[in-house]
Image: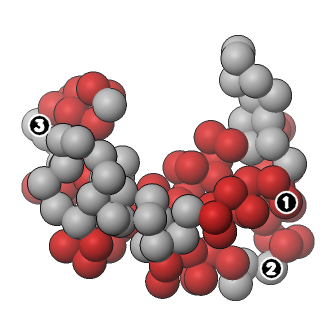
Amino acid sequence: MLHVQAGADIVKPVVNSKVVELIEHHHDRYDGGNQLQTVTGDNIPLGARIIAVADAFDAMTSNRPYRAAMSTEQAIKEIQEFKGTQFDPVVVNAFLEIPSDEIAAILENKSEN
C-alpha cells in the first residue's frame, strides 16, 4: 500500500489537495478493513470510492505476471461479492448499471493500448 502515499507525494506539487486526497484514499475499504486507513464509509471521498471500484475492475481484468486476467463476468461477480465491505454499495450499484456493451468497448480499447 506504499504506492498510495508515493503517488500522492508525486502529484502533490502539480495538483490540488482534493486530487491528492483521492489518491491517498482510493484503497480505503468501505468497512474500514485496511489497517492504516483513517476514514470509513461515506467519510471516504466519493471520488476515491469510485476509483476503488474502477481500479479493482481494471486490475482484475488485466493480465498480471502472477495470473491471467479474469473475465468481465468474474470481475463483476467479485465486485458484487465485496459490495458493502471493500466497496461502497452505492458506487457498486452505479457500476452495475453500465451496459455490458460499454464495458466490452472499454476493455477492447484497453487491450489495443
Residue at x-position 36% and y-position 48%: 27
Residue at x-position 80% and y-position 79%: 99
Read off the residue under disc 3: 13
Earlier-in-chain disc, 1 versus 2: 1
Q: Position of residue 51 (x, y in %)?
A: 44, 58
The kind of residue on which mark 2 rests is: Pro
The kind of residue on which mark 3 rests is: Pro
Q: Position of residue 9 (x, y in %)?
A: 16, 32
Instruction: Judge the density around disc 2: few (<14), some (14-19), many (≥20) Cα neighbours within 10 Å.
Output: few
Q: Is 3 placed above or below 33 here? A: above
Q: Position of residue 111 (x, y in %)?
A: 81, 38
Earlier-in-chain disc, 1 versus 3: 3
Read off the residue under disc 1: 73
Does residue 91 appear in the picture of this structure?
no
Residue at x-position 62% and y-position 40%: 59
Q: Quadrant of residue 3?
A: top left
In 3D space, how far apart are the residues under numbered discs 1 and 3 (Cα atoms)?
39 Å
